[in-house]
């Protein structure tokens, strides 16, 4: 496999420039090589995106270098791939925590009888955030880490739980409106 090694220098101040580039590299899924630079597979979409980061460094008055690395030993390549997989496993573990947190939230609202539109909106927002996070993680997951399957299963479970909660909320609110209309009709007759 071919790899790209990205190195850069930016002025110490303002630090927001360095933070911006660091965030872009992390978002891309690049692997920090202990101060020697950032490693990324020489494949799409990584190759195009790293060139965009290269351009950003230069626009921020820094210096960027991009090297093609083709002669890793088998052990070096295996170590790099393992580190990439560990990074994705950590990320998927965080998403799994968020999925479990959402499932507990749905159950708690059900137990407390909090069936209202605001709760539905909050839960929809939580699910949207989890789905966006998963989409970003998938973009960085060059080796299809197995934890991704567990995340996708939990998201489907959360979607089903939210759909059931939303349906129950709708039905309860419809029943409440119906009872209120009946009560108004009874009051107008007296």
Image (cartoon, helix red, strand yellow):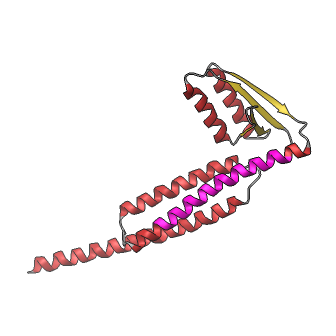
Report the magenta residues as a range: 78-105
Indicate yes or no whether the magenta region holds residue 178: no
Give left or right: position of 131 versus 2. Answer: left
Residue 33: image quadrant is: top right
Q: Nearer the viewer, residue 177 or 6?
A: 6
Residue 25: image quadrant is: top right
Q: Nearer the viewer, residue 23 or 124?
A: 23
Report the magenta stretch's main SS: helix
Q: Residue at horizontal 69%, vertical 60%?
A: 147
Where is residue 8 drawn, in percent x and y? Answer: 70, 26
Q: Residue at horizontal 75%, vertical 47%?
A: 84
Q: Eyeballing the image, is 16 above or below 147? A: above
Q: Nearer the viewer, residue 165 or 38?
A: 38
Where is residue 91 drawn, in percent x and y? Answer: 64, 52
Residue 156: image quadrant is: bottom right
Indicate yes or no whether the magenta region holds residue 94: yes
Give left or right: position of 13 versus 186. Answer: right
Where is residue 75 drawn, in percent x and y? Answer: 89, 46
């Amino acid at each position: 496999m071919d790899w790209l090694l990205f190195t850069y220098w930016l002025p110490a101040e303002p630090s927001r420039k360095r933070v911006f580039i660091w965030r872009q590299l992390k978002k891309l899924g690049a692997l920090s090589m202990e101060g020697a630079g950032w490693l990324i597979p020489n494949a799409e979409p990584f190759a195009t995106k790293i060139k965009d980061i290269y351009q950003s460094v230069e626009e921020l008055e820094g210096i960027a270098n991009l090297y093609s690395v083709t002669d890793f030993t088998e052990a070096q390549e295996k170590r790099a791939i393992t580190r990439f997989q560990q990074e994705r496993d950590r990320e998927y573990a965080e998403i799994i925590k968020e999925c479990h947190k959402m499932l507990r939230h749905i159950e708690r609202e059900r137990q407390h009888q909090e069936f209202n539109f605001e709760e539905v909106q909050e839960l929809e927002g939580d699910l949207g955030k989890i789905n966006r996070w998963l989409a970003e993680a998938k973009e960085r997951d060059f080796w299809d880490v197995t934890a991704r399957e567990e995340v996708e299963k939990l998201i489907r479970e959360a979607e089903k739980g939210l759909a059931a909660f939303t349906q129950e909320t709708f039905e309860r609110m419809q029943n409440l409106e119906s009872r209120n209309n009946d009560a108004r009709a009874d009051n107008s007759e007296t």
